[in-house]
Image (tube, grey):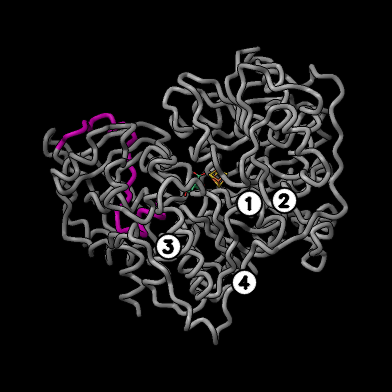
């Protein structure tokens, strides 16, 4: 008998369909779910469409943290919808102001050994506390809330052994930047990253969470740390010691890949524009002038992160050329900073204090100036995501961010002398008053779900036809993100429950005529490169193309969550058997996939016919029985309805 890794142990405890065999699909029972408001409105609309009266999980929480810039009625209406729906259906409601979903969930709800799925790609933050925490599309979360299993392809495991201890001024952010440098933004697809080794003991739970959070940028299914005495201390300080369980990999656990990182050899680093894996040391980048610094996000907004920043800013002034914005991650963090005076140090230095929410990370305010250089402690620096198309975003640690805010140039914090030493608190401020409990089952019937006028019906796929005949309506390159497919930002995010309106912005950055072309043609096939659909979990990146008539996406490879969202929507994802065939197709070519229905049903070979060029290309697909049935039915909702 071989031993098990941490994730294998958790999966084994939760498997309800299939087996623990790598590369095969299995269904796991989900203990906890989380949603945020930008994906939550759709998730709860889908939950309502499923007709389930109460959630069946151990715990489900609806957070409001993304669309908090209320420039019209839309966001506030959506918050009200989510609040009323949560109350009726048995979901806790974390009010706007309570903080960023992943930070709050780690503080108040995460439990080692439990499964969590969230309608947000950074749900793996929970891996910092030893959860199997996975990002998913809204519909998958709705199904899990209804008691359904969540299906994953059993991933390979990558062992990351941490040796030694971080040097002063080097941070958890630098650890994950190093992993990104080694593995790249597609290196984690189909894998779970497990951390182990002596170095683990030197990292606090929030530091571990910074590392698992940005495992999303590797494309990994999730990342996980052991649950040990440090975890116990954290839970104790959160008044939840009873939630502690010890969890580690067996000595003889078997991994598919191994990486060793010596923490003591790491230096302050940054991910350069416009990809999280374009990693260089701060020394290499040099002292370029900085226009903006933003500190916060689900990656780096914990109490200790903020205390370090406050200590660096204390008694100093933000450089005249820099705009410094700080968003503490939760009400708990903000309240503690306010009580101990650290907030005053930030304010005195000239920081612009933002509410505890995603804010600039998702382009909800604080867009940099034209061609601006912005240093952010966030996790994504995709082109245009900040709201300023030509700005250059660098992802850095809180230490690098705060040091550079003072000097006005990209600064290696090791130049500032002695590093501040901040201890983890023995007791956090515990105040759950911003988390509203749902109505009891008896009272729930009387609760009315409140729909605002911005909520429009969402598209549902059609059963798969005999063949697909359509143009290559768009051809894109490698690493296309869901931010390209369905951009976010303050102007567009309020319409997450209005697919017809959103459709006008689909793929704008790649081809400004995309929506118009789709509407003219009524249908289309998208040709994609490698790692198509990386980044966020937003199912809008599938629902909007569905609305615009996209029938299939043929790419070199896919990111995990987006591929699942495509299938859930009834859009068929194929990959090229020969990657070179990608080069033979031009945007506008007339394409056809004949006999698609029969072939998928009977697992036969499928080819993509290029009618314009009179050529054919073999396509690859590997759908489980469940996925096959979903595709034939035209998506997960039809499939579920057919089954009932
Ligand atoms: C993101 O960081 O891109 C988001 C916004 O949190 C998304 C979810 C969304 O688009 O609403 C994510 O990461 O899943
Ligand atoms: Fe919010 Fe940014 Fe984290 Fe997404 S990555 S959940 S937008 S803070």
Residue 107: x %, y % from top left: 72, 56
Decide which of tag 4 and tag 3 comes sooner along the chain.
3
Decide which of tag 2 and tag 1 comes sooner along the chain.
1
Residue 244: x %, y % from top left: 79, 64
Q: Residue furthest bottom?
A: 442
Task: Kindly identify which residue carries mark 1.
Answer: 99
Determine whether 235 is above or below 479 in the image. below
- Disc ID at residue 437: 4
Decide which of tag 2 and tag 3 comes sooner along the chain.
3
Task: Kindly identify which residue carries mark 2.
Answer: 225
Foreground: disc 4 or disc 3:
4
Task: Kindly identify which residue carries mark 3.
Answer: 139
Decide which of tag 2 and tag 4 comes sooner along the chain.
2
Q: CA distance from mark 2 to mark 1?
A: 23 Å
Determine whether 47 is above or below 204 in the image. below
The residue closer to the viewer here, 246 or 136, is: 136
Element carrying mark 2: loop
The residue closer to the viewer here, 500 or 125, is: 500
Q: What segment carries the magenta color?
A: 563-589
Tag 4 near tag 3, CB within 8 Å: no
The residue closer to the viewer here, 297 or 345, is: 345
Residue 119: x %, y % from top left: 50, 56
Q: CA distance from mark 3 to mark 1?
A: 24 Å
Structural crowding at the residue carrying mark 1, measured as other residues with C-alpha within 10 Å and reported as few (<14), some (14–19) or many (≥20): many
């Amino acid at each position: 008998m071989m031993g098990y890794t941490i994730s294998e142990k958790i999966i084994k405890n939760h498997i309800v369909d299939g087996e623990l065999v790598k590369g095969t699909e299995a269904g796991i029972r989900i203990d906890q779910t989380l949603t945020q408001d930008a994906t939550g409105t759709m998730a709860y609309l889908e939950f309502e469409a499923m007709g389930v009266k109460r959630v069946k999980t151990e715990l489900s929480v609806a957070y409001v943290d993304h669309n908090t810039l209320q420039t019209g009625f839309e966001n506030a209406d959506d918050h009200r919808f989510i609040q009323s729906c949560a109350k009726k259906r048995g979901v806790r409601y974390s009010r706007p102001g309570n903080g960023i979903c992943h930070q709050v969930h780690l503080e108040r709800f995460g439990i080692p050994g439990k499964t969590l799925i969230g309608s947000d790609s950074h749900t793996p933050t929970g891996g910092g506390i030893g959860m199997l925490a996975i990002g998913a599309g809204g519909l998958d979360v709705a199904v899990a809330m209804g008691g359904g299993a969540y299906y994953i392809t059993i991933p390979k495991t990558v062992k990351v052994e941490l040796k030694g201890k971080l040097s002063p001024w080097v941070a958890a952010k630098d650890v994950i930047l190093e992993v990104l440098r080694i593995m790249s933004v597609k290196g984690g697809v189909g894998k779970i990253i497990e951390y182990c080794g002596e170095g683990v003991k030197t990292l606090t739970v929030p530091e571990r969470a910074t590392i698992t959070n940005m495992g999303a940028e590797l494309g990994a299914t999730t990342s996980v740390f052991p649950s040990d005495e440090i975890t116990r201390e954290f839970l104790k300080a959160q008044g939840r010691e009873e939630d502690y369980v010890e969890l580690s990999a067996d000595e003889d656990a078997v991994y598919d890949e191994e990486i060793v990182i010596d923490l003591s050899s790491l230096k302050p680093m940054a991910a350069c524009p416009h990809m999280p894996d374009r990693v260089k040391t701060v020394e290499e980048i040099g002292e370029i002038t900085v226009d903006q610094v933003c500190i916060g996000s689900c990656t780096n907004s914990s109490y200790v992160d903020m205390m370090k920043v406050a200590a660096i800013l204390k008694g100093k002034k933000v450089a005249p050329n820099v705009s410094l914005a700080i968003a503490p991650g939760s009400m708990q963090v903000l309240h503690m900073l306010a009580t101990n005076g650290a907030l005053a140090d930030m304010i005195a230095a000239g920081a612009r204090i933002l509410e505890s929410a995603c804010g600039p990370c998702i382009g909800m305010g604080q867009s940099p100036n034209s061609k601006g250089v912005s240093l952010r402690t966030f996790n994504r620096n995709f082109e245009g995501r900040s709201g300023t198309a030509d700005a250059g975003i660098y992802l850095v640690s809180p230490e690098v961010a705060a040091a550079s805010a003072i000097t006005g140039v990209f600064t290696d914090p090791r130049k500032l002398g002695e590093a501040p030493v901040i201890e983890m608190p023995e007791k956090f401020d515990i105040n759950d008053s911003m988390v509203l409990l749902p109505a009891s089952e008896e009272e729930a019937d009387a609760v009315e779900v409140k729909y605002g006028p911005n909520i429009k019906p969402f598209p549902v796929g059609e059963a798969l036809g005999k063949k697909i005949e359509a143009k290559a309506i768009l051809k894109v390159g490698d690493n296309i993100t869901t931010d390209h497919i369905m951009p976010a930002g303050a102007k567009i995010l309020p319409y997450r429950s209005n697919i017809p309106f959103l459709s006008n912005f689909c793929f704008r950055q790649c081809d400004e005529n995309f929506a118009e072309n789709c509407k003219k043609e009524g249908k289309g096939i998208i040709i994609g490169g490698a790692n198509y659909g990386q980044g966020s979990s937003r199912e809008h990146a599938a629902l909007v193309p569905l609305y615009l008539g996209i029938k299939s996406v043929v790419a070199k490879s896919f990111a995990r969550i987006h591929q699942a969202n495509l299938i859930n929507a009834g859009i068929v994802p194929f990959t090229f058997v020969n990657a070179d065939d990608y080069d033979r197709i031009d945007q506008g070519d007339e394409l056809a996939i004949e006999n698609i229905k029969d072939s998928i049903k009977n697992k036969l070979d499928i080819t993509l016919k290029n009618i314009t060029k009179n050529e054919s290309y073999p396509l690859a697909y590997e759908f489980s029985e469940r996925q096959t049935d979903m595709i034939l039915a035209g998506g997960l909702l039809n499939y579920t309805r057919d089954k009932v």
